[in-house]
Structure formats: C-alpha cells, structure tokens
Amino acid sequence: MSKLKLAVIGGALALSALTANAALADITILAWPGGPEETALRKIVDNYNAIEDNDSKASLLFFSRDNFFDKMLADAAAGSKEFDVMLTTTYSVGQYASFMVPIDDLVTEEVKATFPQSALDSQSFEGHLYGIPTDLSVNFIYYRTDLFEQLMSDAAWQEKYTEIANAELGKDLEPKMPADWTWDDFVASALFFTKSINPDSPTRYGAALQMKNIIFSVMIWQTSAAGYGGNWMDADGNITVDSDAYRQALDIYKTIAEKGATPGGSASFEYSEANGAFGTGQVAFTLQWSAAYSELIDAEAYPQIEGKFDITHPAAGPAGVKTHFHALGLGVNKASEKQDEAKKFLAYLASEPVMTQYGKEGGKPPLSPALTEAYAGGRPDVLKMGEYASDYGVVMNGATSSKALAVYNVMAENFTGYWSGTIDQDTAIANVVAAMEEDFGK
Amino acid sequence: MARKVSWERQQRTDARLLLSGLCLFLAIMLGFPTIANLWYSFSDVSFQDLTGSGFVGIENYVDALTNPNMWSALLFSLRFAVVATVLQVVFALVLVFVLHPLVQKRPWLIAPLMLPMMVSPALMGMMYRLILNEFIGPVPVYLDMLGIYVNFLGIENVYATLVGIEVLQWTPFAFLVLLTARQSILPEVEEAAVVDGATGTKLNFLVILPMLLPTLGIVTFIRFIDAFRVFDHIFVLTGGGPGNQTTSISIYIYKLFFKENELGEAIALSVILLLASLLLLQVGLRAVVRRTEP
C-alpha cells in the first residue's frame, strides 16, 4: 500500500472519528435531586436515550438538596463544563442569567401552545427565556376536613369560635370553611384550634407556620402580603414594602405566634417540620407548598390524617386570593461546549407529548389547562396547582431580578426577627427597604 | 574543622531539600489562596465577575466593619465560644478526675465516650432537629409525659440549646486530651505527694491540676477557636435565626458571600478574622510555651 493511500485512509479515519465524536457528543444534565421530579426526569431521559436515531445521549447529575443552589452558583461562576443543562428557578433566573444562554429560539408555536405565557415568563429575565419550565410550586392551605366539618355543624363550637375571635382579636367573626376564608378567618381559626386558648380543641395548635430564617419562609408568607395588595415595587420601580399591606400581613404571623397558636418551635420550622406537625394530627391546618400533598397522602407515613384532610387556596385579602408561585426549569450552561446538543434535549423536553409524560410520571409541569387536566389523572393537587397559578399566581415585581435572592434573604432575616420579637416592625421594614434601595439602586 | 563545616553545610542542604516539598505544598495550598483573597478583598468581585478586576481600595473593609449585623454576629460567636469552651473544659476536667481510675482498669470505656465527636456537626444538627421536635422528638415527648413543656428552639431557649449541643459533642475531645495528660503523670509523683501528706482534694488540686495546666491551656485554646467558628449545627437547626439571634460570624460571612453576592465584603471580613486569629494564636502559643519552659 502506497504512502499516499495510507495517508488518505488515515485521514478518513481521523475525520470520521472527529465527526463521529461531534455527532455523538453526550450531555450532562444537572437537575433537582430527589422526589417525584427526579423520578419523572429519569424516565424522560431514558426515553430520550432510547430514541433510535438520537446520537447524543443524556446523563443526569444530582447534587444533594442542601444548599444545591450555592453549589451550582459556584460551579457556574467558575465556568464549569461538568454539566451542559442546568437548573433554573423563577427566583434565581436573574442571578444565573449571566451563566446561561437565552433559548428564545426554542419557543415555537407548539411550545407556546404547551405552556401558558406566565410559565414561560417565570423562566425569563429581561425579555429572554432561559429555561424550559418543568415543575410548578404554589401555596395550598392543608386543613383537617373532620375538624372543620364539625366546626360548621356544631353550635357550641361556633359559639366558642365567635367568643374567641371577639376576645382575642376584637373582631366579630363567624366560622367558615377554609375555601371561604379571609386572613382574619385564618387567624381566628388558628386561635380556635389551639388548646391553650380553647381547652376543648382536639388539636394542640391551630396552625403550623414556617418562620425559620430562610428564604422559603418568606415566599410562603408573602402569599398573604399579596392578598393585601402588597408588592416589592410599583410599576415605576419604587420600593413599596413600607405599606399597610406588608404591615397587616406581617401581623398575621405575629399574632398567631404571640398567642401560641403555632408550635413554639415554629421559629425553626421549614417544609419538613410543618409537614410533620400537620401529619401528627396535632395541628388543624397549615399554609404549605403544593409539593407536600404527595407526601401527606402517604397513609404509612401519616396515618393520623389519613382521609381526614383536604387542600384549598390561601385565604383572601382585600386584593382577593393570591398565591406566591414559582417554577423550576432547565436551561443551557453558557460554559458548555455542547450547547447545540443541550438545546436539542430542551427542545425534546418542551414538546407536548414529553411534557405530558413528565407530568404523568410525577412531575408538575405548568402546562396549559387542557394539558394539565390530561396528565393530572386523579391528582387533585395537580389540577388545583394549575388553576391557582393561573387564577391567583403572583410573582412580585423584581422577584426574578438578579437581586431577588438577596432581597428574600434580607426579608427572611428581618421578618423572622419581627415574628419572634427580637426587633419591632418599623425596624424590620426599614431594614428591608434600605437593603432593597441599595440593591435596586433607588 | 573543615570536615565539620562541610558536614553542617550538607545538613543544611538536606534540610532545605526535605523542607522544599512542604514549602511548595504550603505555597500552593495556602499561599495562593491567601494572595488571591487579599486581592479580592480590595476588589469589586461578584459571582458575575470572579476576576475581581475593579480595584475599590479599602471599601470592602469599611463596609464590613461598619455593618451592625457583623458586630452582632461577632458578639454572638464570642459569647458562644467563651461559654461553650468554659463548659466543655470544666466538664472534661471533672470527667478526668472522676473517670481516670476507672479507665485505667477498663480502657475500652473511652470508646463510647468518644462517639459524639465522631458525628459530623451538620449531622448532629439534623439529629437534634428530630430529637427536639415537639411532635416526634423523644425529649419533648418524655418531658410532656412529666408535665413539663420546654420550647428548645424558641427565642428564650435557643441559645442554651445550641451551646448544649456544642458541649455534648465536643466535651469528649477535651476529655480525651486531658485524660492523656493525666495518664502521663508518673505514679511516682503521686506516691511522693501521698507520702508528703497530700491526699484526695489536695492531691488533685495542688499536685495533679498544676501539672495539667499546660494541656488545659492548649485544650482551651483549641476548643475556643473551634467554637468561635461554629457553623454547621446552628445553620441546620436555626438558619441563624430567628432574626439574627443565632447568626455566628461564619454564618454571617457565608450569607454575605452566597446569598447577598457581596463577595468582596465577605472576603475582607475573612481577612480581618484571619489576622485577628493569627494574633490570638501568637499570644496563646507564647503563653503556653512560656508555661511549659523548664
């Protein structure tokens, strides 16, 4: 064989190897670990890898949940290429946007028909889409049906309820089912079902509030602030936290905590503690993330509330019923060298049949109402999530900005301080406003 | 004479050669991060610009020192470290005097006493989240049976609870070090003291305790430094709250860095703490060395 032939064959082999490598570039997806989200995404990735003519395989990478976002932030800021697709959320999309690639080109007509605009907005920053929304979170009130049915039918209980509302709150209130609550009813019901206030209460506490100094406590609580018409900023970008709406909403938690209608340890309560308290049957209701439903219906884990609870939307304020909502999503790592492959996966993920399948496998994608109904099956939480997000969902002005996490952090620090009595309300609000003015350059 | 000079020179060369590996390791692992951090502390650095290209002079240091939250976090850490250290050392010392005769005959008893220290502090925090939970935690449940209600993580008790967990976890360390020192005291010394009439309390306080003082100083120093930089179990249990009530200086720096994206200020504060701890180390070591000199 001549040298020329050898060179040609060698060149061809090298070229084919190179092109084969380019065509077969596999991608790594950094995703949210644990729970139904992981189970559902694993199934989708398996299906993606099983497609016959797909020469780009995907593999999953999971950090632990603890401080997941700090770890991802450090990696992304360092320009890590260890993952090509990364997680994004409504409240951190602004912070991560500079480490991600806009994916506006993936928004086809099919995608627009699959997701409501609000879902796409929840993954957008400064007019550009950075993530395909995968999982929605809203707030529900989880309440004991047996207790509230008795309250609505027992004359003695009703009399006591009105008496407690008058004595403790100075308000003339009648019992209502949680779906009809105002925030005053929320507080009055918490007091009524608290043994130290009503010795005949079958539960030790009325409510289980999450008041730990973490950002998620603020996200749940600001559902009430939104109900009172509160917002971080007005349309002109002026900070509006120093308002009656915020003050009244802050006093909901403050009153319940001061009167001992939430467990004494609520100052260290987060998601799992609130579930635990409600699940032991010692609490009449809780304001909690929608994700808790799939845990609380597990009769083995929570036998005391088996078949005895239901969910509804948060209470109404003067501005109506509102709920904080956010979505998790997946976007493209800017440092990735396989951005085309990453986008190819995201295009697959954003398609209607795949998203519907993701929902059926346990995910909670924010899809259009008809599609949500199709994948929800018998899951009432999924149906209500879609409905509440579309009817009552609120994203505060500025809450998708690059400063959103810092704002949530300073709110958590100061508002939990107010609820536990370490600082007064004026100081807490002034501290938050000062920090926001600095963050937003006002 | 010439041979002796040559031998000494060879010794010095060998020593330098042997130390070069360690020096290189320290230069890479400590020197580079220290220089980088010093630069960052004078820069406008953020996650969006990790190069820290904008020089801002001492602005980060001024911001760090003028933030009232920093002072409250520093005060919390100091109070926490002093109280926890004193309790750990006192308990450890009492345990040494009480258990020394016992563990001399049954040394295996030391093993179970060491268990708390084997658990990672973050896991310790997770454990106590369960143990102290009002509804499912064994401690509140048993106390409830006795008609006692204690809100361990409420504002009135949270400080004592956190100190208690720290003391439970790290007293074994202080005990182990002090026990080793106690065991190294020659029996002849004790016998001589007994012959001279020192028994019981006198023997312990006038003979044994003074001999333990250098070790006591080192243990106190180590435990103080460790307690001062407390992070894990407090972060897991309270997140630094309610409000800022349990925010230690380490948690404060972490939040500045990761949650508020104030990398320059966080690093400037770390540099200040590094300098302060170097000063403390110098004073502490000098005191210990002086005490141990013959």
Image (tube, coloured by chain):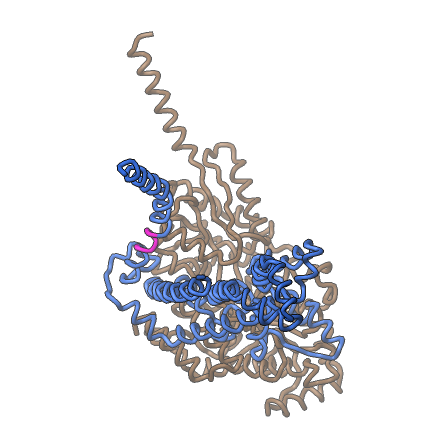
Chain colours: A brown, B blue
Q: Nearer the viewer, residue A215 or A118?
A: A215
Q: Indicate the quadrant where residue A122 lies.
A: bottom left
The residue at the far front in this view is B196
User: Is A57 in the magenta?
Assistant: no
| Number of marks | 0
* Residue beneath the point at 28% across and 40% down: B5
Residue B231: where, in percent of width, then height?
49, 64
Image quadrant holding the N terminus of chain B, namely top left
Query: Outermost residue, top direction?
Result: A1
Q: Main secondary structure of the magenta part?
A: helix
Dividing the image into 4 quarters, which one contains the C terminus of chain B?
A: bottom left
Q: Is residue B34 magenta?
A: yes
Q: Nearer the viewer, residue A263 or B150?
A: B150
Residue A29 appears anywhere in the view: yes
> Can the viewer see residue A291 in this picture?
no
Q: Is residue A30 left or right of residue B32?
A: right
Q: Quadrant of residue B37?
A: bottom left
Q: Which residues are magenta?
A: B31-35
Rendered position, B64 above or below B34: below
Q: Nearer the viewer, residue A256 or B236?
A: B236
* Quadrant of the image occupied by residue A35: bottom right
Side of A269 relative to B106 (left or right): left
x then y, percent, for residue B289: 43, 62
Percent position (x, y) of residue B72?
A: 43, 76
Q: Position of residue A186 (x, y in %)?
A: 60, 79
Q: Nearer the viewer, residue A436 or B155?
A: B155
